[in-house]
Amino acid sequence: MKKFLFLAAVFLTLVILPLNVLAYSVDLTSHESLSGGAWADVTGDGTDTITFDLWLETGTIADIRGFFFDFEDFSGLSDVNVTDLTDMNNDFSLNNVITSWPGVSGNAGMQGAGDFDFGIEFGDGGIGNGKGDIRAITFSILGNADMTLGSDFGMRLMSFGENRDGSRKMIGSPGDPGTNPAVPEPSTMILLSLGLIGGILGARRKFKR
């Protein structure tokens, strides 16, 4: 019985506790109120490692050029690095990423769309010749302290439209219309876990008989 309780505790630790990591999606729309949209899926807000999945809405022709966000408080942070980057087209690597913080203003052409604490530039401007054609990208930031994100996000889109001669400044916040929250529900998982444990106990008693 003690062995079973130990295994149950390990299960609860490995399965339920990670579900407390906050995950949500942010709908980014044009700062200029123009057509076209993008999304940012955020996982790990409030921890020392936050992962972003960036992608364009279906039918949007553009390249993701840069991504920007705020920290609710970065007084305890002295170092933040971009890591675990995956460019879906394999056009570039971490060597092509430029980061700057704090107080990013106008980075990668976001003038007029707000100031941000952290800015990340991907690849180079323009299209073709190995400069990148970035429609979806995943990366993580690693800090030397827990990071809590603020409510403002921005994304710079270049080579926008069928003629690839436009651009967009995208902005958004969690809770905006179109945002899809994916907040974990530990209580549901606890009930499922207890049911699983009860099933195991019942099977154990039946086996003993």
Image (cartoon, helix red, strand yellow):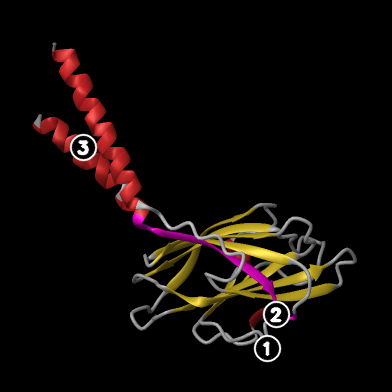
| Secondary element at tag 3 | helix
Nearer to us: label 2 or label 1: 2
- Residue tagged 2: 31
The stretch in magenta equals 20-32
Q: Whole-Å distance between the Cαs marked 2 and 1? A: 9 Å
Q: Does the magenta stretch include residue 105?
A: no
Classed neighbour count for the residue bearing mark 1: other residues with Cα under 10 Å, few (<14), some (14–19), many (≥20): few
Residue closer to the observer: 38 or 201: 201
Along the line of sight, which residue is nearer the eye, 11 or 107? 11
In this view of the protein, which residue sits in the foreground, 68 or 89?
68
Mark nearer the viewer, 3 or 1 = 3
Residue 62: image location, x then y, percent: 77, 64
Q: Do the residues labelled 2 and 1 touch (CB within 8 Å)?
A: yes
Spatial CA span between label 3 and label 1: 54 Å
15 relative to 25, above or below: above
Label 3, residues with CA under 10 Å away: few <14, some 14-19, many ≥20: some
Residue found 64% across the figure and 82% down from its top: 107
Taking the view exactly as shown, the residue that stands out farthest to the left is 2
Whether residue 26 is in magenta: the answer is yes
Residue visible at 58% across and 63% down? 40
On the rendered structure, is 161 left or right of 63? right
**Mark positioned earlier in the residue sequence (3 or 1):** 3
Which residue has dot 3 on it? 8
Magenta: main secondary structure:
strand
Q: In which quarter of the image is residue 121?
A: bottom right
Going from N to C along the chain, the mark reached first, 2 or 1, is 2
Q: Is residue 31 left or right of residue 102?
A: right
- Which amino acid type is shown beneath numbered disc 3? Ala
